[in-house]
Image (cartoon, rainbow, N blue to C red):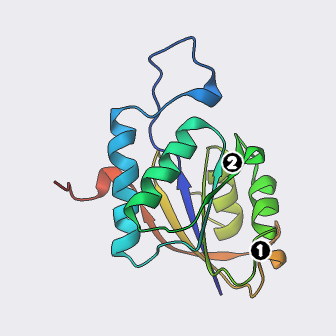
Amino acid sequence: MKTLLILRHAKSSWKDDETQDHDRPLNKRGKRDAPRMGQLLQAQRLSPDLIISSTAKRARKTAAKAARHCAYQGIIELDGSLYLAAPDAYIAALRKVDDQLQCVMVVGHNPGLEQWLALLTGHAVHLPTATLAHVELDLSAWQELNSQTHARLVALWNPGELPETS
């Protein structure tokens, strides 16, 4: 059994029209929500063994803030193929993961993450910014993951539905 955590990047800023999409930073809400999702991971005892993130600034910053608040000790792997990616790119990235790692978190973008979650679970799931999905995969090796893999959605957390923290 493998555990997959799917985190959509936190809310990004649209303030500067000159900023390229790939370089958009987190806005105030995004800077608040990303650490909250990390705190949730720690409270749920779901600190990942590995975090893989899109190279987009908003995804990298979300991954870093969540990692810091869930006591993640590893390096965040950046994967350029996950920027605005389709489900196949996420599958390809995970198929390279060492099988000794049991829990992996990917940080990326819609619509690819929603499409991939629907493929995995058979259910359409809405992933607003900074929403986290906890998925169980009945796999013994990450290399077994493919577009036909079915998974169980264990939990879905939206930061807007979490209690406020001080």
Nearer to the camera, 17 or 64? 64
Give how far across and how far down residue 44 sits, in percent: 38, 76
Q: What's the residue type where badge 1 is placed?
A: Thr
Q: Is residue 13 above or below residue 86?
A: above
In the picture of the structure, the residue carrying the numbered disc 1 is 149
User: Which class describes the residues within 10 Å of circle 1: few (<14), some (14-19), or many (20+)?
Assistant: some
Give how far across and how far down residue 152 sits, in percent: 60, 77
Give how far across and how far down residue 57 sits, in percent: 57, 36
Nearer to the camera, 141 or 76? 76
Please tell me whether mark 1 sits on a helix, a strand or a loop: loop
> Mark 1 vs mark 2: which is more N-terminal?
2
Please tell me whether mark 2 sits on a helix, a strand or a loop: helix
Looking at the figure, which quarter contains the N terminus? bottom right
* Residue that lies at the very extreme toward the top in this rendered image: 18
Q: What's the residue type where badge 2 is placed?
A: Gly
Picture residue at 63% right of the left edge, 38% below the top: 56
Looking at the figure, which quarter contains the C terminus? bottom left
* Residue that lies at the very extreme toward the left in this rendered image: 166
